[in-house]
Image: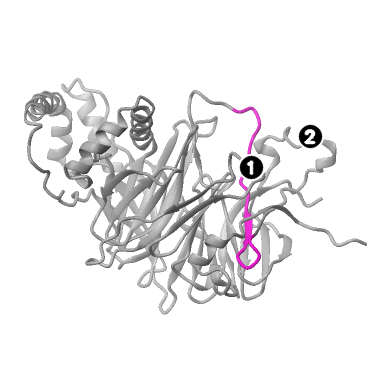
Amino acid sequence: MAKRNHTTPLGCIACDELSELGAGKESWLVDNPFILSALDTHSLALSNKSLILIFGWSDDPFDNIKVNIHPELSPIGGEYITAIEWLVFDDIRVLAVGISSGYLLIYSLDGGLIHKQIIYPTRILKLRVRGTKRDISQDISNEEVCIVMDGVIARFDGSDLQDMLRRWFRETQTNFWDQKRKKRDLDDFENSFERVPYQLWSVTKYGACADAAITGVMPPPLMELELFWYLNSAAFMFEQSSHRYYRAVTIGNDAVISAYRLSEDKNRSLVGAILSKVVPATFSTIASFSKLLWRRDRASPKKAEPNPQSFARAASLTCLKDPPRKGEKLTLSPSGTLAAITDSLGRILLLDTQALVVVRLWKGYRDANCLFMEMLVKKNPASTSYHEYKKSDYCLCLAIHAPKKGIIEVWQMRTGPRILTIQCAKGSKILQPTYRFSSSMTSSSSYMPLEVFLLNGDSGQLSVLNRSLH
């Protein structure tokens, strides 16, 4: 009986340029902690501390690109690249880069610097792009870019970044960019970028975090609901507060798991709540007048270095301390309701992020990496066309890459069995394409499931794990 193959080869990234990242040495992709990767449809970005390589792996000549990016890093501060991730908005595709000094950089596919903004003066650990789209079970859509730093979480709304990028590309297409670029070169280039609004929280109550994620929107505390009910039912004829609360999960050395309620409002006191009902109209008038004055004074010589943004409120919900165990890596399910957490003792914890309860535990997976994926567990692909499957046909699974065992295991969520074991070569790494931001202008009748890709660093071969067991 022929051996069943559970992966499909897609392409090869082997090229001479990879030698700049250390290719040619066995296991170069996984042994060097400064080698970072970000996957998108037909494109892959790899980086070390000072260089980013972007290249396509498909047979399509249009997607077969090769770009070298050398970010301008300060040698005095010892800056280096700490995180990379794709941002994809319909026809806009750019690369976000996190720097050790706390700057967020955004580059176009031709290597041009689109945006530069200080988030907070500490090392960026990870860039997370995720979202939940509006459907029957979800009455709101929530798309965001979460920036994880040492003890700090920042959140950009996807629409704010999309608006900034669309303005940039619109200026480029109308030939205004060259004039603005020349002006930026003459003036202060770094301070000429617009500031994209974001929220910032400190999550250091239980020590610095090694990884973190915003898992979704959560209801306000009970006292907050009673307060706004009182304000809205009294003589104040104002609309209900639009402030959101987010649930965040962090992992680290002092606390394996911690959870926080993140508030968009910097002041949640009674006085602040009352003022939030009375002040907006007055503040809007003052702000508009200030903008008029500011526009008249556009000839100011130079902008000062921006001060760090103040923190919004982060209220602790719970924590799990179990020394000497330390949390190492965290990955979220598409809906954000499950999180797979690896620790220093070789265990993998499956956390229900809403109930904040560990619902499953695996042991003996030291240095493991996890990614959620969707598979056709009970469907036979021979009976249905490949593109006719609906979301309900797929089952959520967890792919666990155990490099010391040389295997990838796929487990059915939440408490299902192990349904697949795949042998993989040493020096391999599992990857997943970034979340693609939705748009009202585009719609697709076919559902695209969450997939996991396997990159063999030594051979350069890129494969995808098959969606079906058959």
Q: Residue at x 28, y 57 (%)?
A: 102
Q: Which residue appears at 33% of the width and 49% of the height? A: 105
Q: Is residue 240 above or below residue 313?
A: above
Of 85 and 182, nearer the camera is 182
Residue occupying the point 25% across, 23% down: 239
Residue 240 highlighted magenta (yes or no): no
The residues tagged by marks 2 and 1 sit, at their Cα atoms, a distance apart of: 15 Å
Q: Nearer the viewer, residue 427 or 13?
A: 13
Three-letter residue code for mark 1: Pro
Q: Position of residue 321 (x, y in %)?
A: 39, 71
Magenta: main secondary structure equals loop
Disc 1, SS: loop
Q: Classify mark 1: residues with Cα within 10 Å, few (<14), some (14-19) or many (20+).
A: some
**Residue farthest along the right direction in this orientation:** 1
Bounds of the magenta span? 444-460
**Quarter of the rendering occupied by the N terminus:** bottom right
Residue type at the position of mark 2: Ser
Residue linked to disc 1: 449
Left or right: 156 in relation to 447: left
* Mark sitting earlier along the chain (2/1): 2
Q: Is residue 225 left or right of residue 273?
A: right
**Horizontal side, residue 104 vs residue 398: left or right:** left
Of 306 and 369, the residue lying toward us: 306
Q: Is residue 158 visible?
A: yes
Q: Is residue 250 visible?
A: no
> Which residue is the site of mark 2?
385
Specify whether residue 459 is painted magenta.
yes
Residue at disc 2, secondary structure:
loop
